[in-house]
């Protein structure tokens, strides 16, 4: 159970980081696809 919880936390953190990275890229490069 601990492994599953940790995996969920890591997955959520990665998704958050990816969303922040895409937002930053879009902000810095408007023509970024």
Image: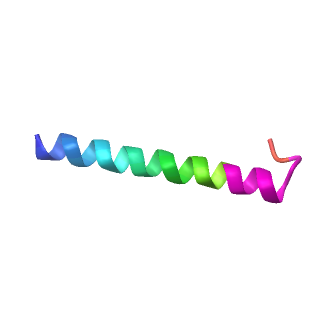
Give the total of numbered labels.
0
Residue 5, given in percent of the width and then of the height, sits at: 21, 43
Residue 25 vs 8, above or below: the answer is below
Instruction: Say left or right for 27 vs 10.
Output: right
Task: Please tell me whether residue 15 belongs to the stretch shown in magenta.
Answer: no
Q: Quadrant of the C terminus?
A: top right
Residue 32, given in percent of the width and then of the height, sits at: 82, 47
- Our reading of the magenta stretch's main secondary structure is helix
Task: Please tell me whether residue 25 belongs to the stretch shown in magenta.
Answer: yes
Residue 28, given in percent of the width and then of the height, sits at: 81, 59
Magenta-colored span: 23-31
Instruction: Say left or right for 22 vs 4.
Output: right
Instruction: Say left or right for 25 vs 12.
Output: right
The residue at 50%/49% (across/down) is 16
The residue lying furthest to the right in this view is 31
The picture quadrant where one finds residue 4 is top left
Q: By what rule are the colours in the image chosen?
A: rainbow
The residue at 74%/55% (across/down) is 25
The residue at 52%/54% (across/down) is 17
The residue at 41%/51% (across/down) is 13
The residue lying furthest to the left in this view is 1
Residue 1, given in percent of the width and then of the height, sits at: 10, 40
């Amino acid at each position: 159970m601990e492994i599953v919880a940790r995996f969920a936390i890591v997955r959520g953190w990665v998704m958050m980081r990816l969303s922040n990275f895409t937002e930053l890229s879009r902000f810095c490069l408007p023509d970024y696809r």
